[in-house]
Amino acid sequence: MKMTRTSKAKNRLAMRHWQAGVAFTLVEIMVVMALLSFIVLGLMAMFNQTQRAFRAGMAQTDQLEGGRMLNDETVRDFQQMVPTYQTNGVNFFAEIPNYTPLLLPLPGSSYPRTNILYDVYFTTRLNQYWNGIGYFVRTNPAYAGNVNPVGTLYRYEASVHDADFIGNAYQPFLNFVNATNPLNISKILDGVVEFRVQCYDNNGRMITNGSPSVATNNFIDITNSFSKAPGEVEFYGFSNNIVPAYVDLEVGVLEPAVLKRYRALPNSTTQSNYLASHAANIQVFRQRIAIRNVDTSAYSPEP
């Protein structure tokens, strides 16, 4: 049965009315757009937080990895320390350089944390070669470079044949003090705020000036610090048959983001103020290293 022209027109009109009834109004569209915008903004905020947490985690992982690498390397080096049995040989040397230690206030304490940088040198031996190994924190590779509260840790190493060492055992240490040759100096770690050493005898007693643990002789020189860092030993110098039995090594490293911001600040005053509020952003690595080749006759027996 064929539809008439009138019935077709009525059907088209009914279809238009139905379509008009199911369309969205302007208010409904605006509500939907607002909801979508809210959802997108929430997802963006969550993404930014996730990305920030991921970057912070990666930075901390890199920092911890650098600290573990440093621990492994220093343990290998310090354990090989040997006495030279030369009166003018430098078996072990450690000194606080001429700079102002970094004081950082700690939450919940009225006593600030004192961060100290030591210059360290000691002698090892491999077959017929004596090796002078040193560590120091500077803003440039040269040993005579600037010492700032935050710097880069460098490692020095140079070898001397046994024939040139005997009778001239002080020369390797002088080479370290005048170290500028990049072939002997390698960069170890950035953002170092502390490189502290403390020496102990074979009974685990800390060695200081006037310590009864060291036998009386002319081959040890120790200066206690009363100005640079009260309570610390400012200078260690061991020769002949004396090396420490144990060395406590403590390294403090700034987090990468804090270090980047610190270096971008215009002057030392602003940098110090910035560091004062970021004591919690310093990762500290500490270990006690036992020296294998200690000569126990250099120490007096425990009372």
Image (cartoon, helix red, strand yellow):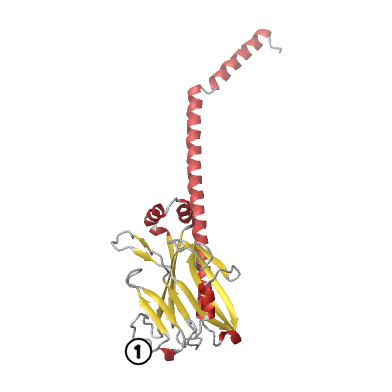
Q: Write down the quadrant of residue 284 in the picture.
A: bottom left
Q: Residues within 10 Å of mark 1 (few under 14, many from 20)?
A: few
Q: Nearer the viewer, residue 171 or 52?
A: 171
Q: State the residue lying farthest toward the right.
A: 2
Residue 284 is left or right of residue 5, and the answer is left
Nearest the viewer among 249 and 173 is 173
Looking at the image, which residue is at 54% across and 81% down? 124
Residue linked to disc 1: 302
x and y, in percent, of residue 69 in the image: 53, 68
Quadrant, the C terminus: bottom left
Q: Is residue 93 above or below residue 216?
A: above
The image position of residue 224, as x and y in percent, is 35, 76
* Up-down relation of residue 163 to residue 57 (above or below): below
Q: Position of residue 51 (x, y in %)?
A: 51, 49
Please give left or right for residue 169 compared with residue 209 in the image.
right
Instruction: State left or right for residue 113 relative to residue 50.
Output: left
**Residue at the image position 46 percent from the left and 84 percent from the top:** 239
